[in-house]
Image: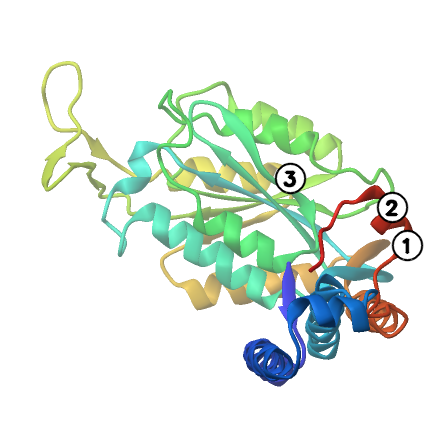
Amino acid sequence: MIQYEQTQYFYLLLFIPLMVLGYVLFNLWKKRVLKSLASTKMMDHIAPERSSFKGWLKQILFWLGWAFICLGLVNPQIGTELETVKREGVDLVFAIDVSKSMLAEDIAPNRLEKAKRLAGELINQLVSDRVGIIAYASGAIPHLPITTDYAASRLFLSSLDTNMISSQGTAISAAMRLAETYFDDENQTNRVVCIISDGEDHGDDALTAALRAAQLGITFFTVVVGTEKGSVIPITKGNSTSYKKDNKGEVVITKSNFEQMQSIAKQTNGLFLDGSNTEEVVTSIIDRLKQMDKQEFEAKQFAKFKDQFQWFLGIGLFLIVLDLFLFYRKTQWVKKLNLFQDA
């Protein structure tokens, strides 16, 4: 990442084309005057060591030096500096259902967008807790490792969609097993997995998986999105919309399973919530997190951008000093090599 601290100094670069134009005009005037005073042969006799090439070289060095000094004044800031800070918090992993049933629109705008909104509002309320994201359907995949970077969390959260996992279905137990491997601190006493789903489950016994996770110290918060009445699953292709059908050709009605989600939370002494009211869900979860014991851990956080002005100023000053020590007469060793034929 690069940014510029003092962009107003960019205007100093506009002097370079003016200096180039001035030098060209000055050379044309000088040649015209010299031509009127003496012939080329006479000038070679009067000043045999003069070099027109050196004049241009000196000017180019000065112009480059000027450009680098201007860039130094702008102060390009490239890269970031991180500092280690100590925090106390809870590890909170979101396990979000991305199966096709989450496209149902029995909760506005649809179940998946509601789930993302709930998780996003929760992240906005966190202070020093670490978060991670798991996406699951028939299987589970790690979407974001445990981190304190809330900006990255919101970015990864927004990228969730129902095409992330090709094989469809819903296996909550797969998300639970993956969550067991997510917590990287053995001393962390409070490990929370927040499952946001419609509760449909076509996988192994989720309650058995919840019991196993509870033995490892994991607590489940379950949030149901959708309604028990259910809704159809829209499938959009281009400008046309159809509805998901079963093997018999009948339109599928997906119903949220409140009982399943409540049982998972109960098995781990967790928290069960209806996701229809975002504010109530966020308040309930944040209040529960505040009641938990906090584990101290070290985390890296942004401190400042790295200033790089010194490199540009150093190069600029070097070029200008080199220009000052470069004389207009021909260089003897270059002359012997006969590389330049100065008139």
Residue 90, which numbered label? Answer: none
- The residue drawn where x is 75% and y is 61% is 80
Q: Is residue 51 left or right of residue 124?
A: right
- The residue drawn where x is 27% and y is 37% is 255
Q: Is residue 139 left or right of residue 313?
A: left
Instruction: Say few, some or many: other residues with alpha carbon within 10 Å of mark 1 (under 14 / 14 to 19 / 20 or more).
Output: few
Residue 336, which numbered label? Answer: 2
Image position of 76 with respect to 273: above or below: below
How many marks the image carries: the answer is: 3
The kind of residue tagged 3 is Thr
Q: Name the residue under label 1.
A: 332
Instruction: Say few, some or many: other residues with alpha carbon within 10 Å of mark 3 (under 14 / 14 to 19 / 20 or more).
Output: many
Towards the viewer: 62 or 13? 62
Towards the viewer: 165 or 152? 152
Q: How far apart are marks 3 and 1 (CA)?
A: 88 Å
Q: Is mark 1 on a helix, strand or loop?
A: helix
**From the image, which quarter does the N terminus lie in?**
bottom right
Q: Mark 3 points at which residue?
A: 268
